[in-house]
Image (cartoon, grey):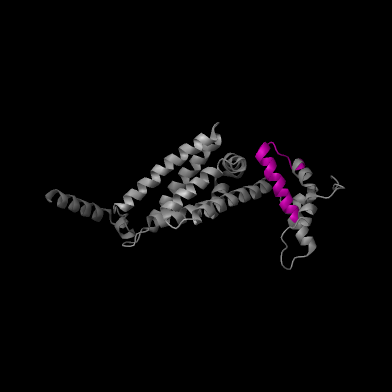
Amino acid sequence: MSKPSSKASAASKLLRGGLPSVPGAGRRAQFSAATKRALVDVAERLFTEDGYTGTSLDAIVAGAEVTKGALYHHFNGKRALFEAVFERVEGEAVRVIQAAMKAHRDPWDKAVAGLRAFVDVVQQPGYRRVVVQEAPAVLGYEGVREQEERSSLAVVHDLVGQLLVDRDRPVDAGLVATFSRILFGALAAAGEVVAESDEPTDASRRVEIAFGYLISGMQLLREAGVALPTADELAEPDAIADENAADDESDTRG
């Protein structure tokens, strides 16, 4: 087993540098938290630079200046450590997007601001490598989906709910969820386009234009008074068809 470095470890440096103290926690608990943070910091850098396969636990503990035992105290292996890095990178991206949206009150302005923030995020090396390129292979579809449902999908769902709200009639909750899933899937695909492009700046610009058209189209439909069906109407599609036919006949007579 490797011996601890004689020089100050990364965890010690973090602790001396002002790691936020936890109320009621002793120095040992704070040092443990600093060790975990140092491991995630180094792992994030190495996973970004060398990918999951190209990064070894030996390189991570060497960079964090801790022992393998300290790593296994916090994580049961490389995959668990990668998951912690993924959650951090994804969480930071969500906070950046939320901050951009928070600066606006109008939901359509929020959508545009959120889109632009997302386009900026997917150009960052850490997000591109960890979230877009490595996570699906390392964590699998379900693992990525679970984390996204707790973070980024929730943001999209909340925004879609604001975009589709109708003061005169309740919008079907299932329809909002469907819109959210479709939009989120499109955003995920857009992230892949940028991550795999040799010219990420140009690719991001195209993504922004494409989604701008989609958002503008939704806005025009809403402003034109095109209503979405309620839950009751979705349960009786024939009634909707008869109502639409009656409206068309009335327009023809007029």
Residue drawn at the location 65% of the way across and 48% of the way down:
85
| Residue 60 against residue 103 in the figure, above or below | above
Whether residue 171 is situated above or below residue 205 in the rendered picture: below
**Most common SS among magenta residues:** helix
Of 216 and 153, nearer the camera is 216
Q: Quadrant of the N terminus?
A: top right
- Residue 206: image location, x then y, percent: 46, 37
Which stretch is magenta? 34-58
The percent position of residue 45, horizontal first and vertical second, equals 69, 42
Magenta region includes residue 50: yes
As drawn, the residue found furthest toward the right would be 6
Looking at the image, how many numbered discs can be counted on the residues? 0
Q: Is residue 226 magenta?
A: no
Q: Residue furthest bottom?
A: 24
Name the side, left or right, on which 197 lies relative to 71: left
Q: Quadrant of residue 129?
A: top right
Q: Residue at x 77, y 47 (%)?
A: 64
Identify the residue at image location x=37%, y=46%: 216
Query: Of residues 79 and 60, which is closer to you in this image?
Result: 60
> 109 or 149, which is in the foreground?
109
Q: Furthest-top residue in view?
A: 198
Q: Tell me residue 178's x, y (percent).
A: 41, 51
The residue that appears at 28% across and 56% down in the rendered structure is: 236
Residue at the left extreme?
253
Tell me residue 21's x, y (percent): 73, 62
- Let me know if residue 249 appears in the view: yes
